[in-house]
Image: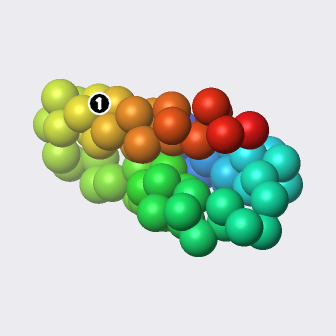
Amino acid sequence: IILPSVRLIISFLLVFTVSSRISFRNLFTGTFPFIIVILIPSIPITLPPFIRVLSLILGLHLLSPLSKVL
């Protein structure tokens, strides 16, 4: 029960940190990866860990192009 809450907090902190650095011009291009990162902790625990890991990798992969912009 504690783990999803911690991941949710970390995800919001990550989104806030990245979005505060990004300019308003690039805000819309980064909205989709941010949504993915927010949705990662809300993935049901009943799903196999493999699928959850894939979702995490997908979210990080979508964020990687943004790191070049920052």
For the C terminus, the quadrant is top right
Please tell me whether residue 40 is drawn above or below residue 65 in the rendered image: below
Q: In this view, does 65 lie above or below 18?
A: above
Q: Which of 39/60 is in front? A: 60
Identify the residue at image location x=66%, y=61%: 26
x%, y% of residue 2? 57, 42
> Is 23 situated left or right of 60 in this image?
right
**Count of numbered circles in the view:** 1
- Give the left or right position of residue 11, taking residue 23 as reference: left
- Identify the residue at the far right of this view: 20
- Report x, y in % for residue 42: 42, 58
Q: What residue type is labelled 1?
A: Val
The answer, for residue 2, to whether it is visible in the render is no
Q: Nearer the viewer, residue 52 or 6?
A: 52
Read off the residue under disc 1.
53
Give residue 19's quadrant in the image. bottom right
Q: Residue at x 29, y 54 (%)?
A: 44
Q: Quadrant of residue 10?
A: top right
> Helix, strand or loop at disc 1?
helix
Label 1 neighbourhood size at 10 Å, few (<14), some (14-19), many (20+)?
few
- Residue at screen point 78% across, 68% down: 24
Residue 28: percent from left, percent from top: 59, 70
Q: Can residue 43 be seen in this view?
A: yes
